[in-house]
Amino acid sequence: MSRRARRLAESLLALTTGLVVAATTGCSTAEADRTEVVVTTNILGDITRNIIGDQAEVTVLMRPNADPHSFGISAREAALVERAGLLVHNGLGLEEGMLRHVAAAEEAGVPVVPAGDHADPLDYTSDESRGEPDPHFWTDPLRVVSVVEEITDRVVEHVGGVDEDTVRANADAYRAELEALHEEMAERFAEIPADRRQLVTNHHVFGYLAERYDFEVVGAVIPSGTTLASPSASDLEELAGAVRDAGVAAIFADSSQPDRLAQVLADHAGLDVAVVPLFSESLSEEGEGAETYLDMMRANTDSISQGLLGQL
């Protein structure tokens, strides 16, 4: 072989090797991306992180104190959703601004966990959302136990590199915490007399809590399961009448929303009714009292109990 031919052969070999390395690196990067777990809401994000621990990276899209019905994501985050190893979302229509991104991820072949589908979901029974599935299952910690089991199985099945024994041990430990939370809530709510177990909220969010712990939902300022709806004057008048008839001691408003509408209702009812903030749909920033799901539920239990017992 001539020197020129040898140099040409060496050049072709180097080029081929470079292309193979580049292709291999690209595949490795894609596979690495596919080990990341992406979660839509911060409540589900906290639950998922307790299951996974340090076994995989978990990216939560919704910021603290955000509204799950209306939050949006960037183009970079949208691309991350479509490259995820696993996508966890509510599944019952909660994240209205995320639905098209979830659909795109499914089309791209991303394994998806619709968490609410595994929580024995309830339907709304009143107002304009009647008959639609209620996505707020997390207000019942025992339903969250079922969701933990589903997320755990899907993590083990789809997320590369995790140790199954570690993930399942994490899930078992968290399940025990959820069951202990349920016992705490049941004991605290048992202190509220039956004639005071009545809830009025800024929108329909506590149906699962009401069913589990024997509360009556008198109504909501916004007669819908979404904060994107608005009440009419007749809605307010009707609910004000129900509040007067029931003699409720407090109206509960989501901490991420202004309490103006709840205050308007209190004024319409003509009663001295406290407006009490709850962390109903989002975790809080550090130091605000609802940094984790367990913290949020304990804070809400305290607020509901104190509000209905007139202790605020």
Image: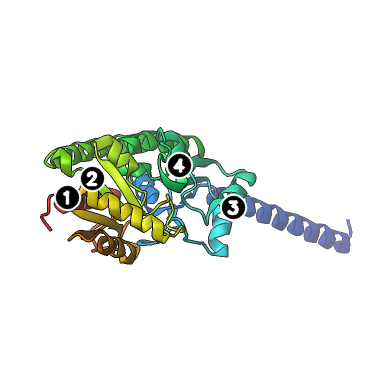
Q: Name the residue beneath numbered marker 2.
A: 198
What residue is at 29 percent from the left and 49 percent from the top?
A: 293
Mark 3 / mark 4, whichever is N-terminal: 3
Mark 3 / mark 2, whichever is N-terminal: 3
Look at the numbered discs 2 and 1 and tell me whether their residues touch, using CB distance below 8 Å.
yes
Amino acid type indicated by mark 2: Gln
Mark 4 / mark 1, whichever is N-terminal: 4
- Residue 270: x and y in percent read 22, 61
Distance Cα–Cα, label 4 vs label 1: 26 Å
Q: Secondary structure at mark 3?
A: helix
What residue is at 38 percent from the left and 45 percent from the top?
A: 136
Distance Cα–Cα, label 3 vs label 2: 37 Å
Location of the C terminus by quadrant is bottom left
- Residue 131: x and y in percent read 47, 38
Q: Which mark is residue 126?
A: none
Q: Name the residue beneath numbered marker 3.
A: 100
Residues packed near mark 4 inside 10 Å, few (<14), some (14 to 19) or many (20 plus): some
Q: Which residue is more in the foreground, 116 or 194?
A: 194
What residue is at 46 percent from the left and 47 percent from the top?
A: 128
Distance Cα–Cα, label 3 vs label 4: 24 Å
Q: Name the residue beneath numbered marker 4.
A: 130
Q: Is residue 301 above or below residue 211?
A: below
Q: Name the residue beneath numbered marker 1.
A: 308
Distance Cα–Cα, label 2 vs label 1: 8 Å
Amino acid type indicated by mark 3: Arg
Look at the numbered discs 2 and 4 and tell me whether their residues touch, using CB distance below 8 Å.
no
Q: Which of pointers 3 and 4 indicates the residue nearer the eye?
A: 4
Q: Which residue is more in the foreground, 81 or 127?
A: 127
Distance Cα–Cα, label 1 vs label 3: 40 Å
Amino acid type indicated by mark 4: Arg
Residues packed near mark 1 inside 10 Å, few (<14), some (14 to 19) or many (20 plus): many
